[in-house]
Every structure is written in C-alpha cells, then in structure tokens.
Image (cartoon, helix red, strand yellow):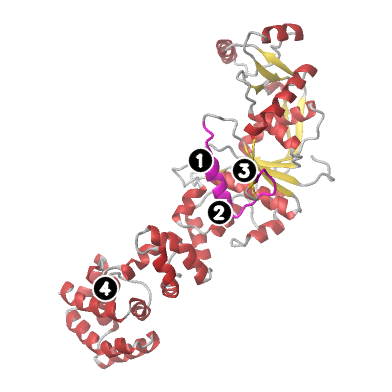
C-alpha cells in the first residue's frame, strides 16, 4: 500500500488501438471520481507503444469519447490552451536510460535467445509438464557486453526468488510465487520498451499514487511490484475492477452488447445515462438507488465497495435508464440534443430547426414521454415533415381507420365543422373540448372519428394528442391531409 501522506494522483492509460471501450470508460470514470473525491489529480496517458495497431484516429476517438462523457483530465502538454494527453512514444529516451542503469546494477540483463531457441524451450516445458517460465539464461557482464556489439538481444528483468505480496484495494491481500513469473522482457530487440516496463517508468515519473484498472491486468501487477522494489521505489496502491460480462456471463463482446462508447452515442443514449449505467457495473450508491448523478458518484465512490465478481451488462436495463434521463430532461435541452439526429435523418436542416425553435421544442415535447433515445425521435415526428399527400400510413393505422364504414362521411363532416376553428387559429384546448361535444351530438363513438383522423394526420396507429398535432401541422396541412384521406381511405 502507499503511505498515507502521498498526494492523490491517478491516471487512465488506454492503448489507442480502437474506440473507447465500455470497460475502459468505466475504469476512467472510477479513477476520475476517486481523484475528484479526494482533491487529487487525474491524468490521461496514451500507451501507444504498439506501433502497428496504434493510430491517431483511434487516439482521437478515445479522447472524443471521454470528452462526450464529461471525464476531463488535469495535466498534459498544452494544445491550444487545453491539455493534451501524455504519450509513451514521446518518452522513449527516459526509458532507455533507466534500462541501461538496470543492466549495470544487475537487476536486468541482456538475453540473446533466438526465436527458434525460445520456441524449443516452450516445447520442452510443454512435453515435460513444466510451466513455461523463462528464468536465468543471462551471460556474465563481459560476455554480454561483447556479444551486444554484434548480436540482437532483448533486455529481461531478473525476477528474484520468493513471494510477491500486495494489498489490492478491491480484492484484499494478493500473493504470487515468484517462481511462476517469467524473467520478462523489458525492452524488445528493436529497442522499443514493453508495457510492464514503461508503465512503471511513467507511473513513477508522474508520481501516481493509485493504479486502478481491469482485472485482466492482475497478472501484470507482481511484475510491476518487483520492478518498483528493484528500483528502490514505493509502489502505488493497486486495485483491479471485475470484468464486465454479457448476459451469458462471459466477457462482454459484440455478440452480447455493443462494446464501444461511440456506438451508444450514435444510437442517441444520453451521456449522463451512460455514466450512470457504467457506475452500476460493479458499484452501487446503496442497495436501492439506481438513478443518481455523477456528483453522487464523486461524493461516495470507494474502491472497497466495488464487487469482486463480474458485473452483468444488461442492455434492456441500459435502455430503460436512458429513457428515464430523456423523460427527466428540460425540453429545450432535449430538443438541442435531438436536433442532430433529426438533421441526420434528412427531415430538416439545422438552420430550419433553429429558425423554428419554439415549434421544434413543442414537437419534441409531444414525444418526450415515448422516446428512450435521442435517435428515436426522427421516426416519431417524421409525419410533421411529410408532404401532405404523402403521409405514410402504417398498416395498423389504416386497418383501424377502414373498419369504420362511415369514415369518409365522418372525416368530411368533421373538416367542414373544423374549418372555422382552423381559420380562427383556435387553441388546442378549445378544439379538443368542442370536438368531444361534436362527437356526442352526432351519436358517434370516439374511435369512429379519432382512428380515421389519426391515420389521416399522422399515418400512425397511436401517438401524441391529436389536437397538439393539429397545432404543430398548422391549418393548411390539416386541411390538405383530411382532403387527401378522403381519397386514400375510400
């Protein structure tokens, strides 16, 4: 464990080999929340030593995902007045210097085994039933230095005998037999450093006090603890989060749920709902509260409260949670967030929606209780943008309308009665009340009017209040759609 007087400094260190993963986002969120709760610093460091798979596009996707979620960081190179992330590839010189020092003091050594020799060793271990653990094939210093002038080599860490122990903030006491740990490669033959080496170098130079990450890194921890000890340094406190599992209780994959944060953004999930849901993957505010703010997380997050077992990723619950946030939104904010999806669906231009902002907010309000995602809205309000004679009739809506034999006469009579109200711009409340009187006076049942009327105006079998719809459509569109229905429902 770290000493209590160390400054609280945490980091998130993703590899830019793809978009921001759901598991990575949860790791970043919990580290960020812990730093914020304890008045510490949160650092973003890009681990881009995998030169073949790391790309600027993937890095940009990771950064964009974090910004969308509202997870900010406190340090980094200045980029136009903002903090950029640290990158491992920009720190290679410091890694090489430390590696050479370790060779000099004997805590690391040059290993000249060829690929074929390593493969032969593995086959021998496999046939003899031994665990494939590489240890102790280094040369004496003079021979090593001589061969290094001409032969390729890697630098390996010298794992000492004994047991490595540490206290995990989530799992408690953990121990590893050093005899089961490889003399692992610190620097490859091409001179590039490996993960376990650079992560300790960076965490040391950045004075990281707590390292919290996914449990897939648990087997790396003894290697890193041993390296800290070899350098005479105090290791940080470690914590390993459980895996996020699909409903099949296997590691989350695209088969059981989208794994990239970007996918949920594209589908129109509120970022606050994504954060809330991520919090529930292994942690809870209490035993009953499922909807809470990020400030609640910051005020209460303790890694000791994180479950040791894997959390189950439930897409249905995620969608429910998104809907709760949508319904709780202020309509102006909801309209702003839905706007790009309406534009992307080709229903209107951004300029048009902003020019008719009040109208658009009223349209959004009619569907707020029915949508769960921002991307649900375009299909729900597409009828408002249709040409009056080209409203798409849903088969069920048309079936509902056609089962009333007097539908054409009812629509024709209703339009004649409605015309003065359209011309006068009567408010929805007044038209609603007088329509109910009109239906009663003619001895009709409400479905006899409202099912053909809804089909004519919206093409849907259900939806928002029809008198709100009339106000949104305007007198001319209402008139033309009812006239068109007289032909289409004949």
* Element under disc 4: helix
Q: Which residue is drawn at 24% across and 76% down?
A: 481
Q: Can you identify the residue that label 3 sits on? A: 242
- Most extreme residue toward the front is 80
Is any atom of residue 482 visible in this view?
yes
| Sequence-wise first label, 2 or 1 | 1
Magenta-span inclusion, residue 75: yes
Residue bounds of the magenta highlight: 53-78
Query: Residue 126, image x and y in percent?
Result: 57, 15
Q: Where is residue 315 in the image (x, y as percent from the top left)?
A: 48, 53
Label 3 and label 2: CA atoms lie apart by 24 Å
- Helix, strand or loop for disc 3: loop
Q: Closest to the observer: 179 or 490?
A: 490
Specify which label sits upstream in the sequence, 4 or 1.
1
Front label number (4 vs 2)? 2
Residue furthest bottom as drawn: 441
Mark closest to the chain's N terminus, 3 or 2: 2
Within 10 Å of disc 2 (Cα), the crowding (few <14, some 14-19, many 20+) is some
Residue at figure coordinates x 71%, y 9% from the top left: 144
Q: Cβ–Cβ below 8 Å for labels 2 and 1?
A: no
Circle 3 packing at 10 Å, graded few (<14), some (14-19), many (20+), is many
Is 317 inside the magenta-drawn segment? no
Which disc is residue 57 wearing?
1
Query: In what element is the residue under mark 2?
Result: helix
Q: Distance between the residues labelled 4 and 2?
A: 39 Å
Residue position marked by numbered label 2 in the rendering: 68
Q: Alpha-carbon distance for marks 4 and 1?
A: 47 Å
* Above or below for 112 versus 293: above
- The label number, if any, that marks residue 455 in the structure image: 4
Q: Residue at the location (62% across, 44% down)?
A: 309
Callout in the foreground (4, 1): 1
């Amino acid at each position: 464990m770290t000493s209590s007087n160390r400054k609280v400094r945490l980091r998130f260190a993703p590899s830019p080999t793809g978009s921001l993963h759901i598991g990575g986002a949860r790791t970043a969120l919990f580290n960020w929340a812990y730093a914020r709760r304890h008045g510490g610093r949160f650092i973003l460091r890009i681990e881009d030593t995998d030169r073949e798979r790391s790309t600027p596009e993937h890095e940009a996707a990771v950064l964009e995902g974090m910004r969308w979620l509202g997870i900010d960081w406190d340090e980094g190179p200045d980029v136009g007045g903002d903090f950029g992330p640290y990158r491992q590839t920009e720190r290679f010189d410091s890694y090489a210097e430390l590696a050479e020092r370790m060779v000099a003091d004997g805590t690391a050594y040059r290993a000249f085994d060829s690929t074929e020799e390593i493969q032969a060793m593995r086959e021998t271990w496999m046939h003899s039933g031994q665990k494939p653990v590489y240890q102790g094939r280094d040369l004496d210093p003079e021979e090593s230095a001589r061969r290094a002038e001409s032969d390729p080599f890697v630098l390996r860490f010298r794992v000492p005998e004994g047991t490595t122990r540490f206290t995990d903030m989530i799992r408690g006491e953990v121990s590893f037999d050093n005899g089961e740990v490889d003399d692992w490669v610190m620097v490859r033959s091409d001179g590039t450093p490996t993960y376990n080496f650079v992560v300790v170098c960076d965490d040391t130079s950045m004075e990281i006090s707590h390292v919290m990450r996914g449990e897939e890194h648990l087997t790396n921890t003894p290697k890193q603890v041993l390296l800290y000890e070899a350098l005479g340094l105090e290791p940080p406190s470690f914590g390993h989060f459980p895996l996020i599992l699909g409903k099949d209780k296997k590691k989350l994959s695209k088969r059981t749920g989208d794994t990239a944060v970007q996918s949920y953004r594209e589908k129109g999930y509120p970022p606050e709902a994504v954060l809330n849901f991520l919090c529930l993957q292994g942690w809870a505010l209490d035993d009953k509260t499922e909807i809470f703010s990020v400030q609640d997380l910051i005020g209460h997050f303790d890694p000791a409260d994180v479950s040791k077992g894997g959390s189950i990723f439930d897409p249905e619950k995620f969608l429910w949670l998104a809907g709760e946030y949508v319904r709780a939104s202020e309509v102006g904010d909801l309209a702003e967030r839905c706007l790009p999806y309406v534009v992307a669906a080709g229903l209107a231009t951004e300029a048009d929606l902003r020019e008719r902002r009040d109208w658009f907010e009223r349209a959004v309000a009619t569907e707020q209780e029915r949508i769960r995602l921002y991307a649900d809205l375009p299909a729900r309000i597409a009828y408002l943008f249709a040409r009056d004679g080209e409203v798409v009739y849903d088969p069920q809506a048309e079936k509902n309308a056609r089962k009333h034999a007097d539908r054409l006469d009812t629509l024709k009579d209703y339009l004649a009665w409605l015309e003065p109200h359209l011309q006068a711009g009567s408010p929805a409340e007044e038209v609603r009340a007088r329509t109910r009187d009109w239906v009663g006076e003619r001895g009709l049942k409400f479905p006899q009017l409202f099912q053909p009327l809804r089909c004519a105006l919206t093409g849907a079998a259900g939806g928002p209040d029809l008198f709100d719809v009339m106000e949104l459509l305007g007198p001319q569109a209402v008139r033309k759609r009812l006239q068109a229905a007289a032909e289409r429902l004949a």
